[in-house]
Amino acid sequence: MIDDDSTPLHGGPDALGAPLHDFSTNANACGPCPPTVAALQAADPTRYPDPAYTALREQLAAFHGVGRERIVLAASASEFIARITAAVASSPLGAAGAVQVPVHAYGDYARAARSWGLPLQTAAPQRPTVLIWACDPSAPLGQAQAALASCIASLREPAVPLVLDRAYEPLRLGGASGLSAAQLARVWQLWSPNKALGLTGVRGAYAIAPEDEAAAQLQSRLQRLAPSWPLGAHAVAMLQSWADEAAQQWLAGCLPTLRSWKAAQQSLCRELGWAVIDSDSNYFCADWSAVLGQGEAPQLLQALRARGVKLRDATSFGLPGHVRLGVREPASQVALADAWAGAGGATLG
């Protein structure tokens, strides 16, 4: 189970600043997306956005082929996770229920549940389930979530929302979603395209609600819990660009490059003596416990960080002895090999 903490664990910049070679985040290493950067530069931050976000919701709805009323905007994926958890927890059934999360998952699902005192369960429920989280491709393993289709098929109570986090669907490098359009229509789909666009510093996300009465009621609760103007001008520009053909063409052109870089990076990790776990996404996990002594991982992570290379310790995901690596360009891969040798990893491997 995920180890929760009041301070979120995340990849990216830290107290030492931005790493020169940052394998700890899953942002598209080919980014940032030039059309989106141009849209951000053209954004007008001197004015409030339309509080109803009419044009943005229409554009996202057209992009996904759904009704505009099904689009729920959020300040970020994490903000939506917190808000929908609050909406469920504060409902009449919430206090007696539990939240179902994958065995290995993004920590904010658990953090949001625990902030409301909701217990977690990963399989057969011991208490009534009031919220289900799923992710495809999964985090941190980047694989298709096991038994996801059967989980959706078993949803007999429409008042229990299943939220499918699709943050990494645009960066899928292998495999394919096994879910049909009919199955996707039964779940909440959460999209946060800043990773695919290589612009994780711009926050903005949205969800697509199922088309049923229970979802409509939950949408009303989500709207009442939302702050005014959850998206600023730059988030609006990013999401509008995301739904535009130029950004989608750029992203499609990135995928072959990322596949090539991923293959080389996995080969490098195997040469270092790490056991690579394959994935469908632009990131993967590796078990490096075989080349480390007991308790050496934190010191080695710090030594690598001091040499400009940051990896993501997967312990908080429930995978001690593992690291998660976002796919990076060849120059960063060379830096990883040099930093590993300089930090003493070569003698361990």
Image (cartoon, rainbow, N blue to C red):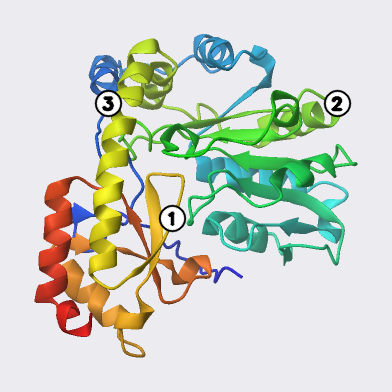
- Given residues 136 and 114, the one toward you in this image is 136
Considering only vertical position in the picture, is 228 above or below 292?
above
Q: Quadrant of residue 213?
A: top right
Residue 33 is marked as 3
* Label 2: how many Cα within 10 Å (few below 14, some 14–19, many 20+): few
Which residue is found at the position 51% from the left and 9% from the top?
Answer: 55
Query: Which quarter of the rendering shows the N terminus?
Result: bottom right
- Given residues 287 and 78, the one toward you in this image is 287
Structural distance between the alpha carbons of marks 1 and 2: 40 Å
Q: Position of residue 172 (x, y in %)?
A: 45, 37
Q: Which residue is mark 1?
A: 278
Tell me which amino acid carries mark 3.
Cys
Which residue is found at the position 87% from the left and 57% from the top?
Answer: 128
Q: Position of residue 19 (x, y in %)?
A: 18, 56
Tell me which amino acid carries mark 2.
Glu
Structural distance between the alpha carbons of marks 3 and 1: 27 Å
Tell me which amino acid carries mark 1.
Asp
Instruction: Give yes or no for contact between labels 1 and 2 (Cβ–Cβ under 8 Å).
Output: no
Q: Which residue is mark 2?
A: 213
